[in-house]
Image (tube, coloured by chain):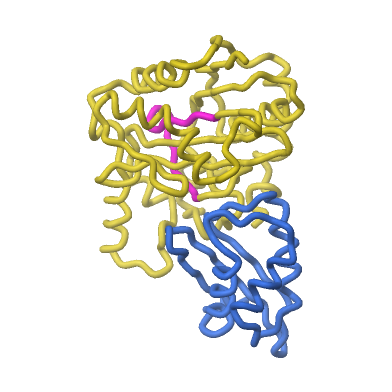
Amino acid sequence: MKWRIINEGEFSEAMHHAIDEVLTEKMDEGEMQPTLRFWYRKNPSVPMGRFQAFKDEVEVDYAQKKGIEVVRRLTGGGAMFAEPGNVITYSIYIPKDQVPEDFEESYEELDKFAVEALREIGVDAEYAPLNDIEHEDGKLGGAAQLRKDNAVLHHTTMSYDLDTAEMLRVLRIGKEKVSDKAVKSAEKRVSRIKDHADAERREVVEKMIEKFVEDKKHEHDQLKDEEIKRAKEIADKKFSSEEWNKKL
Amino acid sequence: MQKASHKVEDGKMVKIGVDINNEEVEGVEIRGDFFLEPPEKLGEIEEKMKDLDIDSTIEEVAEKVEEVEAELIGFSHRDIGEAFRKAVEEGDEK
């Protein structure tokens, strides 16, 4: 089994989620080799959890004013704020029989290479159940999964150099019952790779890929034209639509 | 709709809205940062919960939700029960 490594492709948030859908489907149908894909974003965005309500999570007026693209994911979990170059996101598409059935175990195992890469560049990261990657200063990132009959989609986003003040303006983090003190503590709970390591974003990604392929046969690849074409259709129909994004 | 949030021990948030009309549960919404497999089952769980009445206990809610074949990850059937009780008893009208 040869892993496919994709470390390119700058797209809108909707497109990235559509690519996730296309590649997860292909994996599920047995039409693709297992794949690791790193994301490159075009614009600031909020990927929110599949079971979250749009208006609960996002400061709608502010997000609109700033042109922040809000997309409801295929996966559960929480809302995040992402800016081009300021976060690191990757997706793993893998046959289900290669993933521990236990969710906690599977999160730990699938993010292990990234945690190890961070540790090697000097960030004391560790896995924190159920789906977080933490530093003692706060949360560095989080993962989410979707399980199909034969495939698992596992995607993880980590803060590289996120504007956490802006994040608090965009997301309604516990706004319902919140004093300034609580907002401050939410800000404090986010930790960023760049706070702990003097490495370019590109270097962090390269280190992660290096750790990932250490024990794997692999090849570097690009998205295929047919994959991008199919993803564009899905992005238009689903991940850019109010019907999907504001369903809940 | 009466809404309440219940925080699960490991940190997930379960937000429930209950539509109550003449002491009857007419609709339920479950939202939050949890995981559910398969995800399509959320609507089925919400539909099932319409069978509950406003006096249903945490246990009874949990049992009702268990009738739907789905895996709850990061929260439990009882958490839905606790959120339901909270929404019925002290939920904010929204």
Coordinates of residue B57 in the picture (x, y in percent)? 61, 82
Magenta span of residues: A78-91
Look at the image and say whether residue A25 sits in the magenta stretch: no
Q: Is residue B60 above or below residue A104?
A: below
Q: Nearer the viewer, residue A181 or A69?
A: A181
Q: Is residue A173 left or right of residue A33?
A: left
- Residue at image position (37%, 19%) is A207
- Residue at image position (58%, 16%) is A3
Q: Nearer the viewer, residue A132 or A83?
A: A132
Q: Nearer the viewer, residue B63 or A75?
A: B63
Q: Which chain is blue?
A: B
Q: Main secondary structure of the magenta part?
A: loop
Q: Is residue B60 left or right of residue A109?
A: right
Label tally? 0
- Residue at image position (48%, 58%) is B12
Query: For residue A178, which quarter of the picture?
Result: bottom left
Query: For residue A34, which quarter of the picture?
Result: top right
Q: Is residue A104 above or below residue A236?
A: below
Coordinates of residue A92 in the picture (x, y in percent)? 56, 29
Look at the image and say whether residue A90 sits in the magenta stretch: yes
Q: Is residue A159 above or below residue B94?
A: above
Specify the quadrant that holds the N terminus of chain A: top right
Q: Is residue B93 above or below residue A49?
A: below
Coordinates of residue A213 in the picture (x, y in percent)? 47, 16
Q: Which chain is yellow?
A: A
Query: For residue B30, which quarter of the picture?
Result: bottom right
Coordinates of residue A8 in the picture (x, y in percent)? 52, 17
Q: Is residue A25 left or right of residue A1?
A: right
- Residue at image position (64%, 57%) is A248
Q: Nearer the viewer, residue A112 or B22?
A: A112
